[in-house]
Amino acid sequence: MKKYDVIVIGGGVTGANALRELSKYELDVLLLESNADFGAGVTKGNGGAVHSGYDATKGSLKAKLNVEAVEMWPEYAKDLDIPYERLPSMTLAFNEEERETLEELLENGKANNVPDLRIIEKDEILEIEPTVNPDVKYALIAPSSGITEPYIVAYACIENAIKNGAEAKASQKVIDIKKIESGYKVITSDSEYETKMVVNAAGVYGDVIADMVNPGKYSITERHGSLMILDNAQGLELKATLFPVPSKHSKGMAAIPACAGNIILGSTAEVMNDKENHAFTRDQSELLFTSASKLLPRLRRKDIIRVFTGLRPVEVNSDNDFVIEEDIDNKDFYNAIGIQSPGIAASPAVGAYVVELIKENHDLKAKENYDKTRKGIVDFSELDTEQKRDLIELDPAYAHVVCRCETVTEGEILDSIRRPGGATTIDGVKRRTRAGMGRCQGGFCESRIVTILSNELGKKPEEILKENAGSEIIIGEE
Amino acid sequence: MEEKMTCIVCPRGCELTIVNAEDVSKMEVFNHLCIRGKHFAIKEKTNPMRTITATVKINDGKQNRLPVRTDGEIPKKVYMDIVDIINNIELKAPVKREDIIIENVLDTGINIIATKSVL
Amino acid sequence: MIYDLLIIGGGPAGLSVAKKAYETGIKNMLVLERDDELGGILNQCIHNGFGIEKFNKELTGPEYASLYIEDIEEKGINYLLGSMVLNIRDEGEYKVVEVASKEKGYLELKTKTVVLAMGSRERTRMMIQTPGTRPAGVFNAGLAQKYVNIDGYMVGKKVVILGSGDIGLIMARRMTLVGAEVLRVVEIEPYSNGLSRNVMQCLKDFDIPLQLSHTITEIKGNDRVESVVIAEVDENKNVIESTKEEVECDTVLFSVGLIPENELSTNLGVEIDNRTQGPKVNEKLETNIPGVFACGNVLHIHDVVDYVSDEAEQAADQVHKYLTDTQDICKRQIVLENSDDISYIVPQTIECKHSDIELKFRVRKPASNVRIILEDSEGNVLVNRKKWAVSPSEMEKVMIKGKMLEDIKGNLTLRLKAEE
């Protein structure tokens, strides 16, 4: 049995960033993901805003890591070829009372060292984003915020880590962890692994994993948030992420211009204490649309493409803060849990922070030939004519458009499957290439992708999954 | 006994009322706006006929299924029996449109024919 | 090389345009089809009922398509399969069509005219925001039809269908014939959206219940569909809570309407009508961009494919006139409007006064014993026709005589009037 130095449990943005940071050092590291694909848990149910950090409680770990990470993002995104755009956020106030909240946020943000924060007035707001509701009076503008695609962050980190010698395995649900002399034995439903250290980045299951070595120490509750994707058929080019003045538990129903050009509305926030409930209700989808419409009156119902629900893991005894610490009773068992919003924004710093904790106990030797870069899947639809020609010349699979709504070619889909840590499911292909994410929601391309996956993976079409085990698309031949 | 039936002869969709449906000699049809509705109701009650369309498995072709149909109407009462027969056929490409797949299926005098060429 | 005509789409509309255009003398044309065969959606519509108007016989979808495809082969009309049009640019006298072709790579084709014949796509579960989880086993009816009829795969065993349009009804029968149990068809309207013939032959023949004024209020199951909650709705489509009922199933098919597929048109600068969601056209089926025509489901959703072919032939005739400089000379623009009980009317404008024009429209609700009235701004009646019954599931047509158009005052409005 191969023995690892570190096993990371959880292949979302937190675990993936930790894996990438660890792969910089002379360590045998392995990431275990319970789902059939990485980034398919907490990470996928997210709007993709890279928050600037003005609203995290001052002095919290969350605030520190968020603001640190915002500094890292431009270079980080470039190294990993992750879609990222620096785009200001504006928190919109419609009356004097809401302005008071903006003042509080401004003060909090300054204490958190968020750069260039200020309150602006109507004329400037409308100059930045003319489609905002003209009843707006003030806005807190945060120029350092941005947007990204959360699961691409996870894929990019894992691909880069694999390139630097790390391993990552999906469909490995950890069912028990035993303390052994040399560290820990991690038991999954079909395998066992020995490791010196464990990093627990298991999202909503963070408490379940922590319980395996220290029962009852942590408790995660789930805050459910529904989001809505709008087809940007009317070509709104938002120049800022728009937030209403926040309530206690939510930044409110934001309108986020997604990297791919859609508009994402979200999210709602309801504590439900259910780790598997991804259902959305009629009330939530109504709330999303009506409250976002207050910020952006031009939104149209007919542009709704999709509603989905994500889970935010909240550690109940930590005052809404991230919990990133070594287990008090178990040496070299590191928890990175309760990573709720702004978990995406903070993730590069979270990964680095986990390694800092490990460094307090161990001397880590940096790899000499570490390569910090990763190249993403080409986006055919974004290429100019010459580039399209060249690419097709090189590989005719790029001349075969499989997804018509998002213009995704067979070449891109094959790449998404063939690269390390690649897609093995319909949703995995969708998240990596956007095939099936458009207005027809896979009506045209899904059956074609089933065929491609089945050929590439050497599986029967009826074995191809949408997402996890039990989600076969078709049930067999007629 | 009285029975209701929607006439499907034309888009007008008359809601027909049929009296004595169980006995052809005494059957009466009401609420039809034209004579075709009456004929339709009598035929539906005495000897309803249907066309079957389906697909059969085809090997070594450009696609996995060959669409087929009956080349005329068959009595409704043997519908599912014929479907069962169709569901259990396996062919080898090429098959051309209008090729007879099964001749005189269940002695109905009707053939199952291909509705597309699969090469 | 400059084409006279590029046809975007090789489904029923595109094929009919090609055939007719050839007959008018246009030879320098190309049909662009994204799939690996011609015929479009007809290939998966293996049921019969096509061709009654056009060929006076009952054909299946593949047979209807074959009649055109065989003709196109015989005439030697050029077509390119596996070719996705990525963009169309208007460069005045010429249009440039950007194509990714499996066989020929990336192409930019120059043409004098374009016929938009891209057809439609299905409305999705998400567009109507059916709440619940997002498991496998939720299909648009048309996708399920492709899996079953073309690929030969079963998509599920216990099926609930939402929407009683013809695709939903046809799939209820089809799923039954391949061995699935169709538990019920659920329709939010108080009437079926399909032809009564399909209600009878696809549902009643197989004892499949049709629940009118009902909808699915929730989909359950994390990986695969486990059940749906079905409830009755009141006249305002609000769910009546006390009627909620959970039905175990593994598959839900959505048949909730079609939407013209106009992203290429929009990028080209073609004006879209909010009522049809298709291009605004004049009586020549020409869009606001000269030389760009539209027909078939990309223009408005048809009920019968035969009418798609008719419309496509009209478009081909107009392309021929455009190319030979024999288009009718137009001096003004009459706008066609409709009352609230009519959901749309095509064409949206009339420019020329001397040709006979066929108006196509759909009503919003079923009605019987009505008059269809077309009048101008001063109340002069051009059409006054009695109809026994009208239904949103059927496309209606009325003819205006060319000579009647000569003295129109202002614009035209189409409305329904209840017959006393």
Image (spheres, helix red, strand yellow):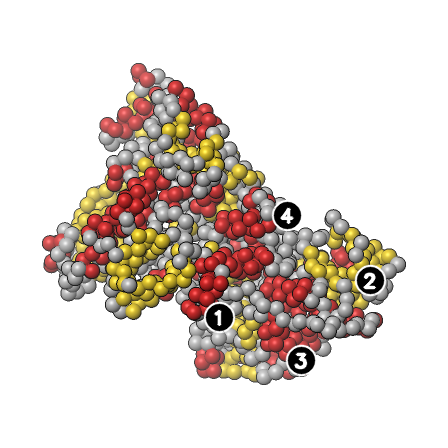
The residue pinned by badge 3 equals A112
Q: First in sequence: mark 1 or mark 2? A: 2
Q: Identify which amino acid the numbered label 1 is placed on.
A: Leu
Of the numbered discs 3 and 1, the one sitting upstream in the chain is 3
For marks 2 and 4, give the CA distance: 30 Å
Q: Does residue C352 appear to the left or right of C9 in the view shown?
A: left
Label 2 or label 4, whichever lies nearer to me, is: 2
Instruction: Report which residue position mark 4 lands on.
Output: A469
- Specify the subunit that label 2 lies on: A
Question: In the visual, does C73 lie left or right of B102?
Answer: left
For the N terminus of chain A, the quadrant is bottom right
**In whole angstroms, how far apart are the C-alphas of marks 1 and 2?**
51 Å
Gap in angstroms between the C-alphas marked 4 and 1: 40 Å
Residue C167, given in percent of the width and then of the height, sits at 40, 43
Residue at which label 2 appears: A196
Question: Earlier along the polypeptide chain: callout 2 or callout 3?
Answer: 3
A434 vs A233, nearest the viewer:
A434
Q: Are marks 3 and 1 on the same chain?
A: yes
Label 1: state its secondary structure: helix
State the CA–CA distance, disc 3 to disc 1: 27 Å
Q: Is residue B93 left or right of residue C320?
A: right
Evaluate if marks 2 and 3 touch, with contact meaning CB atoms under 8 Å apart: no
Residue C397 in the image: state x and y as whole percent.
Answer: 24, 47
What residue do we see at 43% from left, 73% from top? Answer: A131
Of residue A436 and residue A141, the one placed in the foreground of this image is: A436
Q: Chain of mark 4?
A: A
Q: How many marks?
A: 4
Q: Which residue is mark 1?
A: A295
* Marks 3 and 1 in Cβ contact (< 8 Å): no
What residue do we see at 24% from left, 64% from top? Answer: C290
